[in-house]
Structure formats: C-alpha cells, structure tokens
Amino acid sequence: MAGSRMSRPILIVMLMGYLMVPHFTFAQQLHAGVAKADITIQAEGVRINDPVYAKVLVLEQGATQVVIIGMDVTAIGGIGEVTDAFLPDLRARIEGELGIPGKHVLVNASHNHPPISFLCTPEEQLARTFAAVKAAKAGMVPVKVGAGVGHEDRIAMNRTLQLSDGSAWTIRHSNPCPPDNIVKSVGPMDPEIGILRIDRMDGSPFAVLYNYACHPYITVPEGGVTADYPGFASRVIEESLGGDVMAIFLQGAGGDITSILYKDVNRPRDSEPLGLMLGTRTLKAMQGIETGDAELHVVNETLLLPRKNDFDAKVEVLEAEQAALLKGLRGTSMNFKTFLPQYIKHSIDPQHPGYYSYRYLQSESIGKDEMSGIDAWNKGHIDKYLRNIQSMEKMARNVDKIATLRRHQKINDDSGEDTIETEVQGIRIGDFVLVTSPAEVLVDIGLNVKKASPFEFTFMAAYSNGYIHYGPPASEYPKGGYEVTECLLAPEWQALFEAKADAVLQQLK
C-alpha cells in the first residue's frame, strides 16, 4: 500500500469477493410457476355461466419465495363463502408442506358476489387451492418480468355522490338515488391498470398479473355462477396470448367504485362487455412493456387499527330524522292514482295543464279564472306528493343505514377489543410493487399510497389477507355515505394505515 491508497490487485480481489456475497439477489435467476383451481359449486339446479377460480403465481429467487393467489370470491373470510379459517389454514399448509413462509403468501379476493351460492365447500376450497400452489411450485421455469400501466376509464365510476348540503349518498340497489337537483359532484376514480408481464427466457408470454380498482357485481343476463368482468377480462387476455398463458386479476382500492351501468334499467345486466374492455386495454398496455431480470422482495407488518365506537350517536341522529320525515307526511290528499295523471299533465304543459289553451282564454274573456284556480290547487298537492316521495326515499335509505350500523356495532361489541389486528404486506417484483390491506379500501386512500411511494409502479391490492369491511378516508366520516356506515374502523385508521404502508414501501427499497 502506498500512503492511504490500496494496491490495485488487492482492490480487485476484494471487489470480486464482495460481488460473490449471496445477498446480491439480482445475480440470482427469478423463477415462476402458475396453476389454477376450479372452485365452482357443483350442485343440482345451479346454472354455471362461467367457472370461478383460484389462480396461483409462485415466484422464487434464491431463498426468497412468494405466493400470489387471485380468487374469484367475495372476501377472504369475514363475509361470503370463504371462512375465517381459510387463510391461516392455507398458509400453514403451504409453509408446512412446501417450505414457503406463510407470511409470504398473498391471497386477494376479486370481490365477486353473484346473488347465489357459487363456491365449492370450504374443505374443497382449501384442498384445491393448495393443490394449485403445489402444482405451480413444481412447474417453475426461469422468467423475465416487466412492469407497466394501462388505462380504462369507461366502465367504472365513484359511487359516492357528493350532495349540495355537504353530505354523501351512495349509489346502491338497496335504496333510491338522490334527486338530481341536489347532486353536486362525483368522486375520484383510479383508471390505472397495474400490469406485471412475465415472460419465458425466449420472450414468449408466460403470465400476466394485473390490478384494477372496481366492484364486480353486474353478473350476467340469465343469472347463475360467474366471475363477473374480471373473469371475462382474464379470458380475453389468455385467449389472445394463446398457449398456456395465465392471467391473474388482483382487486385494487375499489371500495367506492362501481360500474357506470350498475343501476341501468334499460338493458340486461351483463358484465361480459365490461370484461372485454378491461381485457383489451390490458393487452394493449402489455405490448409496450419490456421484460428483464428483477429482484424479489417481500415485507409483512402487523398493524392495530382502532374500532369505531359512535354507533349509538349515529343511530340517534338517523332516528330523529326518521321521526321528522314521518311527521312531514301529514296532510297528503292525493294517492298515486290521482297524482300520476296530474303530474303528467302539469309536466307536459305547466301553463295549461287542465285543458287546451283556448279554454283558459275563454275564461279570461268573460272575467273568470276557474281553470287557474283548480290548477294551483292541484299543483300544491302534486308538490306535496313529490316531497313525500323524497321523504320515502330518504327513509328507505335511513332504515338500511340503521340496520347496517347496528350490525357492525354488534361485530365490534362481540370482538371485545378496541382494535383490529391487521396485516400490511408489501411485495416487490422488479419495478412492480404491491401494498395490501384487508379492508375495502376507498380509492382516495389507494391514490394516496401510490402518490407517496418511491416506486413508479405501485399498486394497492385491497381485499387481501383477510377482510375488515370498508376503509374510508377520515374526511368522509361526517358525510354519512354507505362506506362510512358499513365500517368497523374509527377515522384515525387512515393515518395509521398510510404511515404503515409508507414504512413497508421504504423497506422494499
């Protein structure tokens, strides 16, 4: 050594030794395997329009192994036909029999919910899904990956309408929509399709993992079992790419997202056209994604979230409003039979609803005003009946909200806990990054996580690794929308979750 400088041969030897240290995971080849399990119910009399699946992607790089499972189900426990035991039992079996850490397993629900039973038994769900994981692990091949985004803004919208009085009203089938004249604006949506393209080493497509925020509950015209439009989108992708390519859908932050055709009464309920649009947009975006070597990382953190405890106060406010609305129904003269023809006549010609205009001119010519008098009388009763209709619509919504609040109050009370233990998982596959939540996360929070991420291609996989109902932004709590009503969490949950998501993202760096 001369002075403080190291001789060149020694430096080269030391650098070569450092480069051989195994923690440099990018020097190790990424492997992937895919498989799927049909988890559709098999019962006499049940029409199966298209089957529902558990689709599996297993990734391995050196000692790091990750399992990602996309399921065409309502939720991973909590509600629907997947029990609370499914996730821990599946993770335990994967860890015990395949050696993959349970905390490295991500299970995402598409939130598909046709209005019928559509899954095989809980025992079969577990057995078939595990078999798919085992098959995917056994069939792994070396792969290259690349990340990118597509864009689809034609099929979905935010379902929480912002009203002129500062409150919110959610588009749902369980209650009417609000009067048009009080709707001020619609909320944001996230039109991004997050895409992980996985190719074989020769450049041929192997699998596609894609993420999109939506609420798949349109179903199909003749009813029956369906995976809804994520299922149709995956079929479009797989048939277009050919071979044995697998498309795996992961639900995003879609808690307050709905189809724009959700309440359309002028055409059959058909999710297939929406799936075609989502699938083709995904395929188009895939064409511009280049694949290459990538690092694989996974982080799993536990987070305690505060439970909501203001149910009684919310119910008291709603019951007081119900009483006032009911009192306002007094003094109703018309019934529907007399209201409807009068309403139509006053709508066709507000100036002359009673008869032709000449009848009014004739009355004026002899100094009488009998037509205008009866018109004004009828108009007053029409307006009263319309106010009653709007009261009925508000009361229908309030009845549903009160029942929902009481149901979720019972869930929190029965838990005996002030907090809910949840999991925030982060997975990085090259430039493609996923952050999970077990909540039905609303789009604002998903957008916040994306914006705060140090990675360009960051996506929220909500409805993952459990289910804790809706996760709305704190700013929505005073507005009274459905997602705030059907919620177990106190508003402070948002800041805690976003901070934990950021910490997970920083660890993935």
Image (cartoon, rainbow, N blue to C red):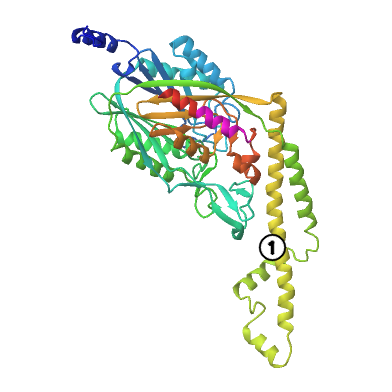
Which percent across, then down, holds residue 7? 20, 9
Identify the magenta region: 491-501
Residue under numbered circle 1: 386
Amino acid residing under circle 1:
Leu
Disc 1 crowd, CA 10 A, few/some/many (<14, 14-19, 20+): some
Q: At x 49% / y 43%, what residue is drawn?
A: 220
Q: At x 38% / y 29%, what residue is drawn?
A: 432
214 vs 24: above or below: below
Which percent across, then down, holds residue 290? 27, 32
Q: At x 48% / y 9%, what residue is drawn?
A: 96
| Figure quadrant of residue 4 | top left
306 in the magenta segment: no
In the image, farthest residue toward the front: 3
| Helix, strand or loop for disc 1 | helix
One can see residue 118 in this view: no
Which percent across, then down, holds residue 109? 50, 30
| Side of 55 where 75 appears, left or right | right
| Figure quadrant of residue 287 | top left
Which percent across, then down, holds residue 241? 30, 34
366 vs 491: above or below: below
81 vs 153: above or below: above
Which quarter of the rendered picture does the N terminus lie within?
top left
454 vs 171: above or below: above
One can see residue 274 in this view: yes
| Side of 477 where 203 appears, left or right | left
496 in the magenta segment: yes
Which quarter of the rendered picture does the C terminus lie within?
top left
